[in-house]
Amino acid sequence: MPEHAMRAFLLALAVISAPVLAQKMDNNDAAAMKQLAQSNLNEIAAGKIAVSKAQSPQVKSFGQQMVDDHTRMLEDLRTLAKAKGVALPESASAKDMAQGKMLERKSGADFDREFMQHMVKDHEAALKDSEALSTKAKDADFRSAVQKAHG
């Protein structure tokens, strides 16, 4: 076989084989990854609201910390999802956008109190979920990422 034909054959074989060689995730792990991405998007959105609406400098600072931390976690998750062939959501869910709108209607100390109560509740649920994921996830890379993010 001529060299150019061999190269073309090998290239075609690589293209055909690539999807088979990609690391496929378990459906439950993929769904959990999507849910985790959604949670990060929601926390980023809530943090941005706090940065713009909070009265207390501490609540504003906490909101910015939420944006920074969850943006970093989301980027790490996106990198892993891309490697695993999982498409993640790009925006906050309709339910969480509605909650954000309700939160935006508050102002001053009422906003600060409501936001912090919301954050405590969300983080307690997130911690519980991440503990479960860190033991149930079948994909070792995903399990490790969850442990790193919430460890």
Image (cartoon, rainbow, N blue to C red):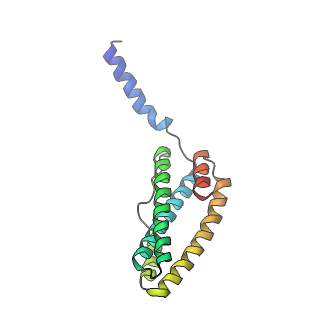
* Residue found at the far front of this picture: 57
Q: Write the residue at 54% across / 78% down.
A: 116
Residue closest to the eye, 116 or 130: 116
* As drawn, 80 above or below 150: above
Q: Nearer the viewer, residue 62 or 19?
A: 62
Q: Position of residue 133 (x, y in %)?
A: 63, 57
Horizontal side of 107 relative to 146 (left or right) equals left
In the displayed structure, 10 sits above or below 116; it is above
Of the 4 image quadrants, the one containing the C terminus is bottom right
- Viewer-proximal residue among 33 and 125: 125
Viewer-proximal residue, 25 or 148?
148
**Measuring 45% from the left and 47% from the top, which residue is drawn there?**
82
- Relative to 145, residue 50 above or below: below
Residue at the right extreme, as displayed: 135
| Residue farthest left in this picture | 4
* Residue 90 x, y percent position in the rendering: 41, 60
Residue 124 in the image: state x and y as whole percent. 62, 70
Residue under the point 44% across and 60% down: 89
Quarter placement of the N terminus: top left
Q: Quadrant of residue 150?
A: bottom right
Instruction: Residue 147: give x, y in percent of width and height.
Output: 62, 54
Q: Residue at x 51, y 65 (%)?
A: 39
Query: Exactly how many numbered labels are in the figure?
Result: 0
